[in-house]
Image: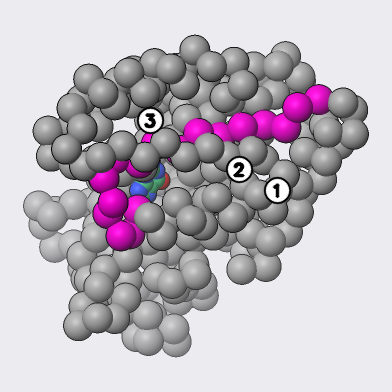
Amino acid sequence: MALARELRAGIAAEVTALRDAGRRPPCLAVVLVGDNPASLSYIKGKRRACARAGIDSREHTLPADSSERAVLDQIDALNRDDGVDGILVQLPLPKGIRATTITEATDPAKDVDGLHTRNAGRLLAGLPGLRPCTPLGILEVLDRHRVPLEGARAVVVGRSTLVGKPVALLLLERHATVTICHSRTRDLAAVCRDADVLIACAGSPLLIRGDWIRPGAAVIDLGVNVVDGQQVGDVDFDEALGIASLITPSRGGVGPLTITMLLRNTLEAYEARCGIGRTA
Ligand code: GUN
């Protein structure tokens, strides 16, 4: 996606400037527990993006049957390592390892996923902090397409900690009127039809049909579902095409922006840790 490429070039230029000034590059540590194929593929994308941006990346792979204690020990070592600026624990984690226990153990200053309650709480309070990458990527896409947010009716379908809840808060911060829907929402179709901005992050294949979309609405599809070996989104893309003013596809839509925002968060964490002020 052109937008992701452009933003990554800007990040790479900032990293080059740091190196030229004699500083070490930022460093991201990725922790993977087990060998979930989707996680392996995401990690490969992150590794490549870091390398292209000049950001160091390290991977720590633990066996799927690791104890929670073993993962916490790994996090503790990364927290204490001064050369590590960002820590990302790839989700989902195997059964028996609680994601919240792991994210709470991560140094909030290195929490490039924005999942620690300190960062989540700061988002809720309207204070600066590290924000989750996919919600940041969604805002970048909406801004690039000049989708008006102030006063707009935004509907978020999905209430996950990683996407639904934080994107709702970011949209609220931008003065949208936000409705969060989920599997128990009554007459979901009618709520969706009211949306100027529709964010689909329910993880439910082809849930949102063309006739749920208000003509001219901006639709962001975060769904990554596999049906009969094919990847489909939460939105029926073909039906949405002629109705929405903007529809992002399941493949190659917001995904590249998520990784881009991870690079940006790593750079921001680095700058904050090194005491370098951002001008932008
Ligand atoms: N798995 C799928 N998306 C994400 C993400 O944004 N962060 C982490 N840590 N794991 C994920």
Q: Which residue is mark 3?
A: 115
CA–CA distance in space, label 3 to label 2: 16 Å
Numbered badge on residue 37:
none
Q: Nearer the viewer, mark 2 or mark 1?
A: 1
Q: What amino acid is labelled 2 in the image?
A: Leu
In the drawing, does residue 90 fall left or right of residue 19? Answer: left
Q: Residue furthest front?
A: 63
Q: Nearer the viewer, mark 1 or mark 3?
A: 1
Total numbered circles: 3
Q: Nearer the viewer, mark 3 or mark 2?
A: 2
Q: Look at the numbered disc 3 and give the secondary structure of its residue.
A: loop
In the drawing, does residue 110 fall left or right of residue 236? Answer: right
Ligand 1 lies under 8 Å from the Cβ of mark 3: yes
State the residue at coordinates (40%, 70%): 250
Work out whether mark 3 precedes mark 2 in sequence or the reverse, and give the earlier one.
3
State the residue at coordinates (46%, 46%): 135
- Which segment is the magenta one? 23-39
CA–CA distance in space, label 1 to label 3: 24 Å
> Looking at the image, is 186 positioned above or below residue 33?
below
Numbered badge on residue 263:
2
